[in-house]
Image: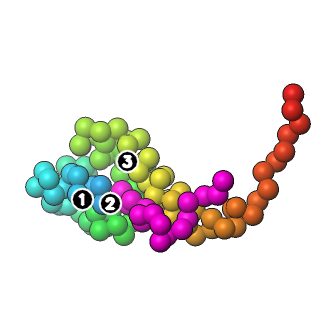
């Protein structure tokens, strides 16, 4: 079974910035500046994440987790899923050509 990389059949990977923007900032009426000040980071960091220009670092995940009452792992899982989905689309055919190691039955 191959990796899902056919971009015409599935939705684009979900960037953690979309979640930050659509599930937190907009519904809660928060600006990037307010969140950045509360988290002790530059406003541009939150703006760039929300604009899907950069990803979530461990540092950012810890801060957002604390501020929004989520776990840091929530944010890191979003980032990891985004990276895996994006890369699978890019190199999926190459990965599919790798033959799995066959092990002798025990």
> Who comes first in sequence, dot 1 or dot 3?
1
Viewer-side residue, 33 vs 25: 25
Q: Residue furthest left?
A: 29
Is 2 magenta? The answer is: yes
Look at the numbered discs 2 and 3 and tell me whether their residues touch, using CB distance below 8 Å: no
Magenta residues, start to end: 1-17
Residue at 30 percent of width and 55 percent of height: 19
Residue at which label 3 appears? 75
Is 52 magenta? The answer is: no
**Crowd rating for badge 1 (residues with CA inside 10 Å; few <14, some 14–19, many 20+):** many
- Location of the C terminus by quadrant is top right
Image side of residue 33 versus residue 101, left or right: left
**Crowd rating for badge 2 (residues with CA inside 10 Å; few <14, some 14–19, many 20+):** many
Residue 81 is situated, as x and y percent measured from the top left of the image, at: 47, 53
What separation in Å lies between label 1 and label 3 (alpha carbons)?
A: 13 Å
Q: Secondary structure at mark 2?
A: helix
**Crowd rating for badge 3 (residues with CA inside 10 Å; few <14, some 14–19, many 20+):** many
Look at the numbered discs 1 and 2 and tell me whether their residues touch, using CB distance below 8 Å: yes
Q: Secondary structure at mark 3?
A: helix
Residue 50 is situated, as x and y percent measured from the top left of the image, at: 28, 63
Residue at 41 percent of width and 64 percent of height: 11
Q: Secondary structure at mark 1?
A: helix
Against 60, is 10 above or below? Answer: below
Answer whether residue 36 is visible to the viewer in this image: no
Residue at which label 2 appears? 17
Residue at 37 percent of width and 43 percent of height: 74
Viewer-side residue, 106 vs 51: 106
């Amino acid at each position: 079974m191959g990796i899902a990389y056919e971009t015409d059949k599935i939705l684009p990977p979900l960037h953690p910035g979309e979640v930050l923007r659509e599930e937190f900032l907009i519904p809660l009426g928060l600006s990037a500046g307010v969140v950045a000040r509360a988290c002790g980071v530059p406003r541009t960091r939150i703006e760039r994440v929300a604009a899907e220009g950069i990803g979530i670092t461990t540092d950012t995940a810890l801060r957002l987790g604390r501020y929004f009452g989520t776990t840091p792992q929530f944010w890191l899982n979003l980032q990891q899923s985004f990276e895996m989905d994006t890369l699978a689309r890019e190199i999926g055919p190459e990965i599919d050509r790798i033959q799995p190691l066959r092990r002798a039955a025990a």
